[in-house]
Image: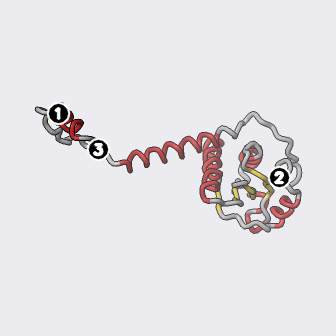
């Protein structure tokens, strides 16, 4: 608490000053927040793309149905994916896309699955020149969020589609 002497000292020191008028515009925080969110989404998408190397050659048996199970996962997951026990909530159709476009779309799908808490998604590769059909599983096994993948059952696209199970 201030005593009378301190108050008098304060008044003597500020004598002759004038009040400052606030004439500076302070921008709203909404735009900064929106920019931050957009930057974060771009960065997360770029981080996801980091996992997809064209050089990596996983040991996938490409003679039979495409399948992959992350280490330390229950083998029953593959059987469930093959039988169609998981219902894909998001679908990605890659028909007519180049490899680079498909890579971007795949990164976006995984990001959307994380954001929306979707555990199972279906990727339709089609047949075409088999480029995407062979490359998509090679990219997917590199991503740490992919728990398992299997060629889709007939009702979800058969051997022209892949079901993926994610850890979100």
Q: Quadrant of residue 54?
A: top right
Query: Is the residue marked by circle 3 packed among few (<14), some (14-19), or many (20+) residues within 10 Å?
Result: few
Residue sitting at 66 percent across and 38 percent down?
A: 50
Q: Position of residue 38 (x, y in %)?
A: 48, 46
In this rendering, position of residue 21 left or right of residue 57 = left
Q: Is residue 58 left or right of residue 29?
A: right
Q: Answer whether labels 2 and 1 touch (C-beta < 8 Å).
A: no
- Residue 66's tag is 2
Question: Which badge, 3 or 2, is on the more N-terminal residue?
Answer: 3
Q: Residues within 10 Å of mark 2 (few under 14, many from 20)?
A: some
Q: Quadrant of the C terminus?
A: bottom right
The front one of 10 and 23 is 10
Mark 2 vs mark 1, foreground winner is 1
Instruction: Give the image quarter of residue 46.
Output: top right
Q: Position of residue 43 (x, y in %)?
A: 56, 41
Q: Which residue is mark 3?
A: 26
Q: Is residue 99 above or below residue 115?
A: above
Q: Secondary structure at mark 1?
A: loop
Residue nearer the viewer, 75 or 124: 75
The residue where tag 1 is placed is: 14
Q: Nearer the viewer, residue 117 or 135?
A: 117
Q: Callout 1: few (<14), some (14-19), or many (20+) C-alpha neighbours within 10 Å? A: few
Q: Quadrant of residue 10?
A: top left
Under circle 2, the secondary element is loop
């Amino acid at each position: 608490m201030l005593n009378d002497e301190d108050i008098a000292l304060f008044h003597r020191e500020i004598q002759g000053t004038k009040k400052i008028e606030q004439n500076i515009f302070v921008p709203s925080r909404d735009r900064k927040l929106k920019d931050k969110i957009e930057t974060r989404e771009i960065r997360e998408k770029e981080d996801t793309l980091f996992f997809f190397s064209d050089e990596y050659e996983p040991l996938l048996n490409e003679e039979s149905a495409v399948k992959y199970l992350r280490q330390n996962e229950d083998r029953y997951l593959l059987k469930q994916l093959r039988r169609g026990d998981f219902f894909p909530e998001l679908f990605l159709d890659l028909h007519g896309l180049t490899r680079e476009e498909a890579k971007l779309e795949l990164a976006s799908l995984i990001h959307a699955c994380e954001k929306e808490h979707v555990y199972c998604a279906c990727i339709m590769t089609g047949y075409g020149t088999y480029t995407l059909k062979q490359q998509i599983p090679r990219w997917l096994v590199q991503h740490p969020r992919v728990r398992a993948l299997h060629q889709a059952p007939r009702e979800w696209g058969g051997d022209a589609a892949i079901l993926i199970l994610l850890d979100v």
